[in-house]
Image (tube, rainbow, N blue to C red):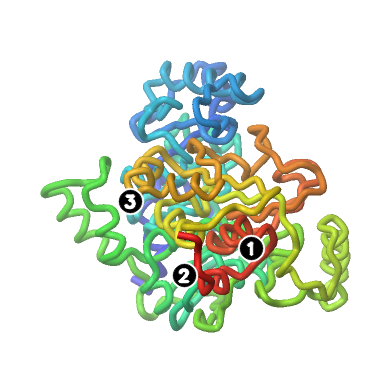
Amino acid sequence: MAARTLVQKIWDAHIVAEFGDGLDLLHIDRHLIHDLSGPASLGKLAERGLPVRSPELTFAMPDHTVSTAVGRTDADTRAGRMLVPALRERTHAEGIRLFDLDDPEQGIVHVVGPELGLTLPGVTVVCGDSHTCTHGGLGALGWGIGSSDLTHVLATQTIVQRRPKQMRVICSGRLGTGVEPKDLVLHLIGEHGADGAAGFAVEYAGSAIDSMPVEGRMTLCNLAIEFGAKIGIVAPDDATFDYVAGRRYAPAGALWELALASWRELASDADAAFDREIEIDAAAVSPQITWGTSPAHTMALDGEIPDPESAQVPAARLARSKALGHMGLNAGDRLLGVPVQHVFIGSCANSRISDLQTAAQIVRGRRVAQGVRAWVVPGSQAVRREAEELGLDRVFTAAGFQWREPGCSMCLGVNEELVPPGERCVATSNRNFVGRQGPGARTHLAGVATAAAAAIAGRIADPRQLAREPADG
């Protein structure tokens, strides 16, 4: 057999039928659904009198439309009032496991899947959400699907997909002190564009990835879609296996040993051919922040906003000019020192326990600047409990942050948790599109430390500098 990449190995293992011209019918091991797209697709199935083919492989949770206020109910938002009861009713009718608002394992679907062991190396994972690529951080093949495909998977537990081209991003060296996986992937997107991996499945490899914690790998894969790829993946290793071991839905006993033997084979062959390769010196990457309205509008935190005329493509020059107008900024400006009114630490990109620990290191003994609304939204109830056991909630609330319930929150505007028009937010989420956080909102994407530093300083600030300054306690 010819040498194959990791993606090709997992893909081939899930082929049910080959249709030719690169189209395959694939079996889906895990189907995750949420309140925003799940009710409609389950409703379409019911209208046609079709049952869910494999309800035991489907898992649901409300996360997109729900309030994250303490004491919340599904009636607290307009969308939640309509969609959460519908999700509850339809999953119950089909025998689908629902992690409801009062469930101790509720949370953001892309946080809960890995932490429960629903996501495992080598499985296929789909969800009606573009950031399903997050699951690639565990060596799974995950990608987002649209509403028609969602209905098809519910009805058949399969999906028709075209084989993607293969890309490898080799990250050598190690990330420097104060530099996060989020900075690495923003740097990649900034250098190669939001369409740099369009049509590709991306495998991240190299010494920087080998030394990266599993939760950091999930952040890296989370933004693969912002790089233009549906799929991002990291080959599983001992760190992955240690992360998965003992989780509720993970194999145990003799099955664990069998699974482990299989997972150790999940790596690209040494002579596998990639259609494109990119190399990055991770040690040369500094903290990053976006200045515009695309993740590709990324710059070094201590740099200057580029001139739109430096873009080679006319459409890109126009897009950059419009982005600067929306953001109220100018070419050549420095972002350090720009006042902010909101800070959001959360989303499926950066709401795991390691993210909250990083933020707490910056926040401890300090106070949120006057006039800044700062939120910490854990990615799941499990993350929330662990953070509270570690006392992180007290660190944040003592500093003036709001400590919220799990959900997508301020990442997107469907849950009424918005940034007012014209106001500026530093967010650890994954998209800074116009209107994403509310009409007229100005969003800067950054890593957790940079967001935490902005809350304390009341302006965009370098967390490395803040870390060198004494805290109050």
Check if mark 3's residue and mark 1's residue have beta carbons within 8 Å: no
Q: Kindly identify which residue carries mark 3.
A: 120
**Cα–Cα gap, marks 3 and 1:** 25 Å
**Cα–Cα gap, marks 2 and 3:** 17 Å
Q: Is residue 229 left or right of residue 12?
A: right
Three-letter code for the amino acid on which mark 1 is drawn? Ala
Query: Is tag 3's residue or tag 1's residue first in the polypeptide sequence?
Result: 3
Q: Tell me which corner region of the image, top left, top right, bottom left or bottom right, holds residue 409.
A: top right
Q: Kindly identify which residue carries mark 1.
A: 198
| Residue lying at 50% horizontally and 64% vertically, measured from the top left | 471
Mark 3 or mark 1, whichever is nearer to me: 3
| Residue lying at 84% horizontally and 64% vertically, measured from the top left | 329
Check if mark 1's residue and mark 2's residue have beta carbons within 8 Å: no
Query: Given the current orientation, which residue lies at the most extreme left position?
Result: 254
**402 vs 217: above or below:** above
On residue 350, which mark appears?
none
Query: Is tag 1's residue or tag 2's residue first in the polypeptide sequence?
Result: 1
How dense is the environment of label 2, judged by Cα within 10 Å: few (below 14), some, or many (20 and up)?
A: many
Where is residue 131 shown, x and y percent of the image? 55, 50
Three-letter code for the amino acid on which mark 2 is drawn? Tyr
Three-letter code for the amino acid on which mark 3 is drawn? Leu
| Residue lying at 40% horizontally and 50% vertically, measured from the top left | 15
| Residue lying at 23% horizontally and 59% vertically, measured from the top left | 262
Where is residue 150 shown, x and y percent of the image? 54, 36
Where is residue 216 shown, x and y percent of the image? 44, 62
Provide the secondary structure element on which disc 2 rests. Answer: strand
Provide the secondary structure element on which disc 1 rests. Answer: loop
Q: Kindly identify which residue carries mark 2.
A: 204
Q: Is residue 473 left or right of residue 192?
A: left
How dense is the environment of label 3, judged by Cα within 10 Å: few (below 14), some, or many (20 and up)?
A: many
Q: Tell me which corner region of the image, top left, top right, bottom left or bottom right, holds residue 275.
A: bottom right
Q: Is residue 142 left or right of residue 242?
A: right
